[in-house]
Amino acid sequence: MNDLVTLRGGDSAFIIDLSRATPEVVHWGSDLGEPARLAVSSHPVPPSSVGSPYRRELVPQASSGWRGRPAVEGHRPDGRAFSPSLVTTGSRALGEHGHEITMSDDAAAIELIIEIHLTAEGMLRLRSTLQNLGDTSYSLLSLTNSVPTGLGAAEILDLSGRWCREQHPQRQSLRQGTWLREYRHGRTGHDSSLFTAVGTAGFGNRSGAVWATHFGFSGNRATTVEKTPSGPALIGNSELFSPGEVVLAPGESHATPWTYAAHSARGLDGVTETFHRWLRSRPSHPASPRPVVLNTWEAVYFHHDIGNLLELSEAAQRIGVERFVLDDGWFRHRRNDTAGLGDWYVDEDVWPNGLTALIDDVRSRGMDFGLWVEPEMVNEDSDVIRAHPDWLSGPGLGRTPVEWRHQQVIDLVNPDAWDYVFSRLDALLSENEISYLKWDQNRDLTEMGHAGAASTHEQTLAAYRLMDELRLAHPSVEIESCSSGGARVDLGVLERTDRVWASDCNDALERQTIQRWTEAILPPELVGTHVGPTTAHTTHRTHSLSFRAVTAMFGHFGIEWDVRGLDDAEFSELSQAVDLYKTHRGLIHSGTAVHADLADPAYSLSGVVASDRSEALFAFVSVATSFDEIPGQVGFPGLDPLADYEATVIFPTLSSPYRAITNVGWIPDGITASGLFLAEVGLPMPVLNPEHGILIRLVRR
Ligand code: GLA
C-alpha cells in the first residue's frame, strides 16, 4: 500500500497518511507543489489524556482515542458491536483525482468504504458506505463524513433563514464544543445553510483561508463543527435517521450522500469559484441559454381565466419573454390551496378544452411552456385521497402529521402511490407540449412513515427516483426545484433538476442577500431570479423597476408580475432589462463571480468577470442609507491587472431617480484605466438613493 496518498486539484491538495492502522489527514489546503517534502511527525501526549499522540483521523473513532462524535454509530440487536474499531484493509486509486479506502472491523463484522475525489476544479467530494458483513442485522444510527479544518481556523460562517428570508449569513467565533445544525424538515429546509465555512479570523470575500462544506441531500441531516481540546476543528455532515430507520440486513449496505468541500486561500470567492467551476463541468449542467421566464403566480395566483392568460402571453411576448410558466391552479378542484393537490388532471370546469389553447398560443409566440406541479403532496380534500386514504405518509398509530397549508404528503415509498404519481406526470408530459416543470414541495415532511416505520430517507429517495424516471422518459423537459421558495436547494436535488427557486420573496432588497449567499455555491444560471411587482407582495416594500431588474439580472432572469397593465415607461425599461439580460447572459452564466469587500455596509459591489477577463459586468447597489456623504472610491476585483478596461454605466439609462446626486466625473461617458488601477485605486461611485443599483460594464481595450 502506498503510505502517502496525495490528491491534487484546482489549487488544493488533500494528503492522507495510510502508514498506520487508521488513515490520517496530513493536509487539506493549498497545493504544496510537486515535489513537496513532507515531514509528518507526532504530537506530544498531554497529561491525563489518551496514551498515544493525537492524530487527525479521517474516520474518528473512540477505539483509537477520539472522544468527540464518532464517524460510525450503530449496534447489533443485543447491543453488541456498539463501538467499532475499523482499520485500513485496502486502498486503491480511482483515476487521477480519486482514492478509495477500505476499513474493516472483523469482530464487529462491518466494512466501511470511503471514496474521496479532489476534482480538477478543486472540489473535494467524499462519501462513505457501510456494509453489514455479519449474520444478524446492524442498526445504523449515524454515518458521518468528516473533514478537518487547517491552520488558524477561528470563525464559523453559515447561513440560516425562514420562508421569504432564506440563506442569511451568521458568523461566530470557533470555540471548544460542538456547533450543531440539525435539519428535521424532511426537506432541505428554509433555514438550511448552503454551506458551512470555517476560516481564519476575519476572513472575507477576497481574503483569508476558508474550509467549506456542503451536504448534497434533501432529507433530514446534521452538520457539525466540532472542536475538542485535542486538536483542530472537524466539519461533519451526516444524514439524521429517525429511530429504527436504517437497519441493515446481513449483506446490506448504506451509502451517505456526497459531502462537497472546497478550500480557498483567498477568501469566500475562492470557494465560490470551485463550486461554480465544478457544477459547470457536470455533463448535465444546462448548456442552452437560460430563457427569460414569465411565471404567472404573482400575476394571477389561482384566478385562472383563459382570456386573461392569453392576454398575459401576448404581453409577455412583446416584452421578450421566452418561457411562459403556468403556476398553481390548473388542476381539478384547485380553486385555492385547500383542495385538489394529488388530482393531476387538467380541471375540466376551468379549462374545458384542456391546456392546449394556451400552450398553442404561447408556442406560436415563440415561447416554450412550463407547468407547476407538486407531486409529493396531497390535500385530504382530493379525489386521490378519498379513494386511497392509506396513501398518506405518517407516523401510523392512527395519526396523520399536523397539517401544513392544508396539505399532507403522499407516501411515495408505497409503490402504488408512486406509480400513480408517475403515471399522471408522464401522461401530462406526453399529452401536452411542456418543456419545463416547476416542481414544488410546500410543507415540511414531518413524521414521515411507511407502514408504521420511519421513512424520511426512503421518501427522499423515492422523490429523487420520480424525478429521475421522468427525466429518462422526457429528456428534454427541464425541472425547477421549488419548495415554498428556497426550502429545497441542495446539490442532491440539483443532480436531477436544472434550476432552483431561491425564495418566494421577490422584494429586490431581500433578494440582494438571498441571492448573494445562494450564489456563494450555486452559479447564477441555476438560480431563478424574477422581477416582481412594483410593491412586493411578500413585504409590501416598493422599489423602482431598475432596482428590481438590476437584482434579477444576476441569475436565471424572469418576471413574476402582471405585465398586461404596464405604462409606457415601465414597458420600455422592462424590455430594456430583458434585452440586457439576453446580451449579457452568456457572460453572467459562464464567468467568475466576484464580490468586493466594502467597508461601508450600505453598499455592495459584485459582478461577473469573463473567464478570459476580456469583459465584466458589475452591480453597484445601495442597500441602506450610509453614514458617509459619498461612497468614495470602490475597487473592482478580478480584472486582469495588466489590461486596460473601459468602464461605463449601462443601466438604468432612463430618467430613473436612482442617483441622489448626478455629478460623478466618469458617468455617463465612461472612463478607461488599467485593471490594477481599477482594483487598487478604484472609481468614485455615485451617491445612490437607498435600494437602488446600477450596472457597470467593463470591456478590455
Ligand atoms: C409555493 C411556491 C410559489 C407558488 C405557490 C403556488 O409557495 O413557492 O412560487 O408556486 O407555491 O401555490
Image (spheres, rainbow, N blue to C red):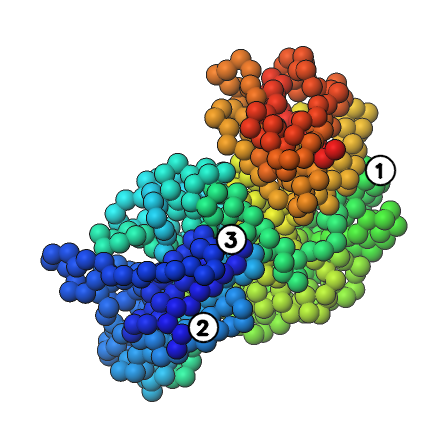
Look at the numbered disc 2 and give the secondary structure of its residue.
strand
Q: Is residue 246 left or right of residue 462?
A: left
- Can you see residue 24? yes
For label 1, the residue is 318
Label 3 residue near ligand 1, CB within 8 Å: no
Look at the numbered disc 3 and give the secondary structure of its residue.
loop
Picture disc at residue 100: 2
In-front residue for pair 697/185? 697
- For marks 2 and 1, the one nearer the N-term is 2
User: Which residue is farthest right?
Assistant: 364
The amino acid type of the residue labelled 2 equals Glu
The amino acid type of the residue labelled 3 equals Asp
Q: Nearer the viewer, mark 2 or mark 1?
A: 2
- For marks 3 and 2, the one nearer the N-term is 3
In-front residue for pair 403/592? 592
Q: Position of residue 151 (x, y in %)?
A: 34, 48
For label 3, the residue is 11
Q: Is residue 619 left or right of residue 575?
A: left
